[in-house]
Amino acid sequence: PPVISSTAPMAHLTQLMSFASASNNTRVIGSAGFTSTVNYVKSQLTASGWTVTTQSFTTRGKTATNVIAEWPYGDATHVIMAGAHSDSVAAGPGINDNGSGVAALLANAAAISQSALRPAKRIRFGFWGAEEQGDVGSSYYVSHLAGGEAKKIDAYLNFDMVGNKAENGKAVGWSLYVEGQSNGLNAPFKSYFSAKGITVNASLDTDDRSDHAAFKNAGVKVTGVSSVRSLNELGACYHKACDNLSDVDSNSVTLASNAIANAVWSLAG
Ligand code: PHE
Ligand code: ZN
Ligand code: ZN
Ligand code: ZN
């Protein structure tokens, strides 16, 4: 895959921060910050030739939206899917949680387009609404798949918080989900991190607290990458007003973007 520089993911994060700044420092579902995020994600993907659909649903009296994007090449009966939640909590702008995952996937969508990639398998990205209300958007997507569609998804890769900084004298806690140990999906990520000389813990137990859970429950093979060491060390600004651009290390979100590119290229063939 081409090397993704820090420019693309950081430009996306700057945009997401501007949407939060115009919306009382939040991108929570029901806010202008969330609507602007959804519109931005849609327009970025459409501009680079992805086929984009949206799905709206209601939770706790608020409407939220999933954006689903497909790179329209490759065998549609073998889908490599990746996803990130696009909403924040009410308390803050959610630039690490989870602007970082959104930015990494958008940078990958552009790289796939710029490379005119013609993969063997189909590549599909999901940008989920209402993760912060309990994985609502991803659950809605999985439960509304037409019969047989879940079986066509060969892998689902989740990216929630990939921009952490070193904190409290500890290096960034790069982690792979425990689910990927037994299904082979951690392998491309492990080889990427080890080639970079970066230590990665390959047994993060997420307690199903993100959007891979719905896919796993539907029998899809899942894993994910995060820059958190554990659910007890999510960062000083986690779910706080200070989860802004200063809460993200550009090296982390760039490293994650390239790790994703490496895995998607290898899994999609
Ligand atoms: N999903 C949680 C949140 O958005 C935190 C989390 C991050 C869980 C990474 C698993 C992996 O608040
Ligand atoms: Zn397959
Ligand atoms: Zn969160
Ligand atoms: Zn999150």
Image (cartoon, helix red, strand yellow):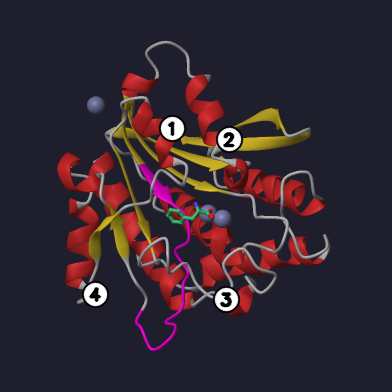
Report whether the residue tagged 1 is closer than 8 Å to ligand 1. no
What is the spatial separation of the Cα atoms under label 3 and label 2, in whole angstroms? 25 Å
Horizontal side, residue 229 vs residue 108: left or right:
left
215 part of magenta stretch = no
Can you identify the residue that label 1 sits on? 214
| Separation (CA) of disc 4 from disc 1 | 30 Å
**Which comes sooner in the sequence, label 1 or label 3?**
1
Magenta stretch bounds: 157-171
Give the residue at the far top of this rendering: 147
User: Label 4 is placed on what type of residue?
Assistant: Ile
Of label 3 and label 2, which has the lower sequence position?
2
Q: CA distance from mark 4 to mark 3?
A: 21 Å
Residue depicted at x 17% and y 70%: 195
Residue 100 is tagged as none
Identify which residue is drawn at 52% across, 65% down: 9
**Residue to which mark 4 is pinned:** 198
- Residue 72 in picture, x, y percent from top left: 45, 32
Work out whether residue 228 or residue 265 is closer to the camera in this orientation and state it. Answer: 228
Q: Position of residue 173 (x, y in %)?
A: 34, 71
Check disc 2 and report the residue beneath it.
137
Q: Which of the 4 image quarters holds residue 13?
A: bottom right
Labelled pair 4, 3 in contact (Cβ < 8 Å): no
- Using the image, determine if residue 169 lies above or below residue 14: below
- The reply to whether residue 1 is visible in this rendering is no
Name the amino acid type tagged 1.
Ala
Which residue is pictured at 60% across the width and 49% down the height? 86
Residue nearer the viewer, 236 or 76? 236
For the residue marked with disc 2, what is the amino acid?
Gly
Q: Position of residue 261 (x, y in %)?
A: 34, 55
Q: Is mark 2 within 8 Å of ligand 4?
A: no
